Amino acid sequence: MTPLEIRNNLLGEKLVKNLKRRNIEAFYCPTSQEAVSKVMELIADGSSVTWGGSMTVRDMGIPKALKERGTLEVLDRDVVDDPQEKQQIYLRAFSADVFLSSANALSEDGVIVNIDGNGNRVAAISWGPKKVIFIIGLNKVAPTVEAAIARARSTASPINAQRFDIATPCHVDGMCHNCNSPESICSYVHLLRNSRNQGRHTVVLVGEDFGY
């Protein structure tokens, strides 16, 4: 193994232990291929599945894998143009069997940090879907909860502001201004520090860089 692979394995093992202490099931997969296989393994045939606005989920090809499996009800808002139909998929996420998400950051002691503009993703993480599966690249790991929040605000949010082309100060110069813009992408800050229900939250860690 390379020095990076050795480091990632050690970090992955530490994170798995710290997540399990918080009643969150966790797995470390060195490659994206292994991670996709693990996600597929965690989803039972016949399940209804959807996801939030995660570039990690999309870049890893998980939507395609879900559809090709042929035994799942896949709720994909990305292929819907009608606003009302799209809204229905947003709402159906709360009764889905499985909700997929990534994270904006993860602290080394296992706290998952997400920031939303609309709040639908963090709402589904907190309540509704029977199972929530996070797919998180090790590039999202920060030393502390405070550093994880800072990463979400200063790294992920300005990039996502560019992705959605919204009128925020960070869209102009790439820096967080702690703004109160009407289009603020940082309206809802969510910390998952413990999973209340056994088996509801699972994290699949990936030893590669994915997402912002």
Image (tube, rainbow, N blue to C red):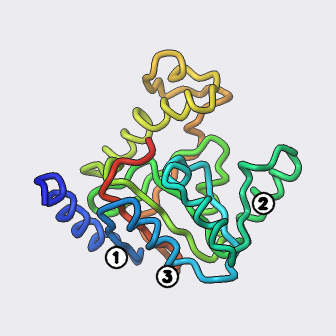
Position of residue 177 relative to residue 25, above or below, is above
Which class describes the residues within 10 Å of circle 2: few (<14), some (14-19), or many (20+)?
some
Amino acid at circle 2: Leu
Q: Quadrant of residue 1?
A: bottom left
**Label 3, label 1: how far apart the Cα atoms are:** 10 Å
The earlier-in-sequence mark between 3 and 1 is: 1
Q: Report whether 186 appears left or right of 33.
A: right
The secondary structure type at the circle numbered 1 is helix
Q: Are marks 1 and 2 in contact (CB under 8 Å)?
A: no
Residue 66, numbered circle? none
Amino acid at circle 3: Gly
List the residue tagged with mark 1.
20
Q: Position of residue 115 (x, y in %)?
A: 52, 45
Q: Are marks 3 and 1 in contact (CB under 8 Å)?
A: no
The earlier-in-sequence mark between 2 and 3 is: 2
* Residue at (32% x, 76% y) in the render: 21
Amino acid at circle 1: Lys
List the residue tagged with mark 2.
91
* Residue at (48% x, 31% y) in the render: 159
Q: Report whether 110 appears left or right of 100.
A: left
List the residue tagged with mark 3.
199
* Residue at (59% x, 40% y) in the render: 187
Q: Position of residue 47 (x, y in %)?
A: 67, 78
**Label 1, label 2: how far apart the Cα atoms are:** 30 Å
The residue closer to the viewer here, 1 or 87, is 1
Position of residue 124 relative to residue 146, above or below, is below
Q: Which quadrant, please, contains the C terminus?
A: top left
Q: Position of residue 134 (x, y in %)?
A: 48, 63
